[in-house]
Amino acid sequence: MKNFDKHFDVAQEILDLTDKELKNLAPVNILMIGKSGVGKSTLINSVFRERIAETGIGKPVTKHLQKITRKDVPITIYDTRGLELDPSVQKQVKDEIYKLIADNKGTEEALHVAYYCIQATSSRIEESEIKMIEEISNKIPVILVLTQAIGEQVKEFQQYIEEMNLDIAAVHSVLAEPYVISKDYTVQPFGLKELIERTFNLIPDSVRKAFTNAQRVDIERKVETAKTWATRYIATSFGVGFVPIPFSDASILVPMQVALLAHITVIFGVPIDKATILSIIAAVGGTGSATVVGRSVVSNAFKFIPGLGTVVGGVISGTTASIVTRALAYSYIQVLKLLASSELSGQETSTDKIVSMMQKQFKNYIKENKRELKNESTQLNMSKDSPLSKVEVARRTVNNFLDKLKNRF
Ligand SMILES: Nc1nc2c(ncn2[C@@H]2O[C@H](COP(=O)(O)OP(=O)(O)OP(=O)(O)O)[C@@H](O)[C@H]2O)c(=O)[nH]1
Ligand SMILES: [Mg+2]
């Protein structure tokens, strides 16, 4: 086991664990269908991280199907081409799609959803297209996406399609990128979050984490997923009630906090480098001692509670540890939210801003739970644990924690 107390590169551990988790994450697989120029690539780039249609690696699977992936984004896009060509080519495209769906079925490459894209302003849908859409829909969920949906006639077109009552999952109008009408008037993108929400509900639970990571437009979904997970993880790791943890033993808190921050990073899927993680930890971990985050974060928390003094008797309770760890998790989530939003709007976020946000959020959370922490402190003051029982409690706490950790990965 690692020596968590000294010379332990917390930031690197977080990055390594994030990497490892990401590699083990089953990707979500999406099929893009539609004629050339309707806006498939634009849609992918707007909805998913890293402008994947542009920067990802494209590999031909068949003549008319291309598989696009990008390292660190847990999504695979299958892009089709040739649908705008003559009926014989259309037939080939169709056969290739059906074969792909059948071949991949039941594997990790199984297709989870298809976006069938039609340019909304074209205001027409061909018989052959309707047939194909319904046939695919018999195999996997299909969302009919009306792209570049600008103008009044788009609403009529959507209504017309809806009235056809096609046997598909949904019809959605979107504008993926701002559309400049004139010097003074630009239509802002819309419909993307709704598309994400609908897709999320259609895909299997096993790939929802990957999808949450890969999409970039619904940041609230990332925040909520991370919060729910962190709360549950912290609660089960520390157990309920009054289980003292030897305060000096960073070996308990550090790996748990590393796992916590890594997993939150995976849920968000915003690129984050080592220097940024280091400054985030240092922001709440006190001095430059970012290598012992567990201990310094806990002791730092007490600095935020005037009159509390230092930790009593060398132990902190499970409740205290969980409040402090939750403060760490929640403030980290807020920082990632900021990073995700800045990325979406194409802005840079300075390290200073990140650090001050981390500190502010952390302080607020500790303040909100001040009374609980004070009660804890009083209880600890009164109970004079014998050294023996402390050792026993510590042993049990460590075992409990390691068990939980084992089950997680
Ligand atoms: N402003 C704006 N332009 C768009 C939008 N969607 C597509 N376009 C434009 O339409 C053109 C074609 O879009 P693509 O995304 O390349 O279309 P595609 O379906 O990937 O085309 P192929 O790769 O040839 O099959 C590009 O010039 C885009 O800029 C949109 O939502 N807003
Ligand atoms: Mg394209």
Image: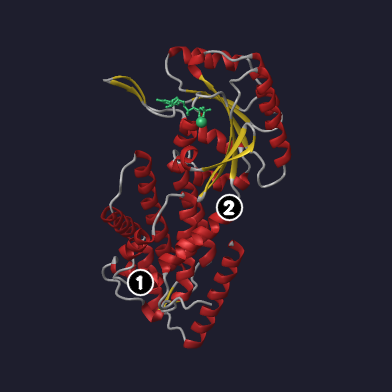
| Residue underneath mark 1 | 296
Q: Is mark 2 within 8 Å of ligand 2?
A: no
Where residue 47 sits: x, y (%)?
A: 47, 36
Label 1: few (<14), some (14–19) or many (≥20) C-alpha neighbours in 10 Å: many
Which one is in front, 23 or 339? 23
Q: Secondary structure at mark 1?
A: helix
Q: Give the number of the disc on residue 25.
A: 2
Where residue 285 sits: x, y (%)?
A: 34, 67
Left or right of 316: which side holds 158? right
Pick the quarter of the image with the C terminus. bottom right
Where residue 128 sits: x, y (%)?
A: 66, 17
| Residue 33, above or below 289 | above
Instruction: Report how many numbered discs are placed on residues in the image.
Output: 2
Whether residue 234 appears in this view of the structure is no
Tell me the quarter of the picture where residue 168 sits. top right
Q: Amino acid at mark 1?
A: Ser
Q: Is mark 1 within 8 Å of ligand 1?
A: no
Q: Residue at x 49, y 27 (%)?
A: 39
Q: Residue at x 47, y 34 (%)?
A: 193
Which one is in front, 42 or 299? 42
Left or right of 188: which side holds 91? right
Say if mark 1 contacts mark 2, CB within 8 Å: no
Which one is in front, 281 or 130? 130
Q: Amino acid at mark 2?
A: Leu
